[in-house]
Image (cartoon, rainbow, N blue to C red):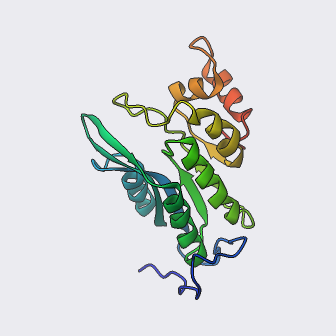
Amino acid sequence: SLRLPAPRAGNIGLLPTRLRPVSTRAVPAVLSIAGSDSGGGAGIQADLKAFARCGVHGMTAITAITAQNTLGVEAIEPVSTRMIGDQIAAVAADIGVDAVKIGMVGSAEAIEAVVAALALLIDGDPPVVIDPVMVSESGAVLLEPEAREALIVRLLPMATVVTPNIPEARQLTGLGKAASQEELARAVVGLGPRIA
């Protein structure tokens, strides 16, 4: 069974200036920052399934709630930026964060909230995997166009690994269909992540 460290005393509203991930636990704790998929096939739900399969403890910070199924996305409701930050701070202050996976963030404001909260984890330098979710498989726009620059300028430089699909890599880099996969990969790496 999973054994996590005992909760630390204190009010999460009064957070220390820097939070450190707990790295001495037997089961690593991984934080997914993403949208909730009511159909269970993507987002937070898919991440938690993958984490469980890999034997790690999954934690979440939900950025948006979607109403979707296998046919498409019916509606999206963003979570407040304060709540996004509070979710990240709560798990970091008590459980600790050994790695972070970021999916759908949705807006420039949500990206700024994530960046600010992750800055609290920087002492431990947990690996950060970014899946730059921009459009759903059914074609629904999941990242506001004005948020693209915030994703590129603010979030990608924090990444250890970034995993765009080919259409996302084209959007991030501005390279057209004539660009090869290698050219796309090199251009994505040029945006700041350590690995693409």
Judge from the rendering whether residue 55 lies leftward or rightward of residue 126; answer left or right. left
List x then y, in percent, for residue 153.
Answer: 70, 38
Which quadrant of the view contains residue 44? bottom left
Judge from the rendering whether residue 149 lies leftward or rightward of residue 166; answer left or right. right
List x then y, in percent, for residue 37.
Answer: 34, 48
Q: Which residue lies furthest to the top in this view?
A: 178
Rendered residue at 59%/67% (across/down): 97
Q: Above or below — where is 178 with respect to 52?
A: above
Judge from the rendering whether residue 48 lies leftward or rightward of residue 165; answer left or right. left
Judge from the rendering whether residue 188 lies leftward or rightward of residue 2; answer left or right. right
List x then y, in percent, for residue 55.
Answer: 46, 66
List x then y, in percent, for residue 164.
Answer: 55, 35
Quarter of the image with the C terminus is top right
Can residue 71 be seen by looking at this rendering?
yes
Counting the numbered discs, the total is 0
Rendered residue at 75%/66% (across/down): 123
For this rendering, which residue is in front, 89 or 55?
Answer: 89
Q: Above or below — where is 51 with respect to 143?
A: below
For this rendering, which residue is in front, 144 or 1?
Answer: 144
Can residue 54 be seen by looking at this rendering?
no
Quarter of the image with the N terminus is bottom left
Rendered residue at 53%/87% (across/down): 6
Q: Above or below — where is 107 with respect to 60?
A: above
For this rendering, which residue is in front, 79 or 22?
Answer: 79
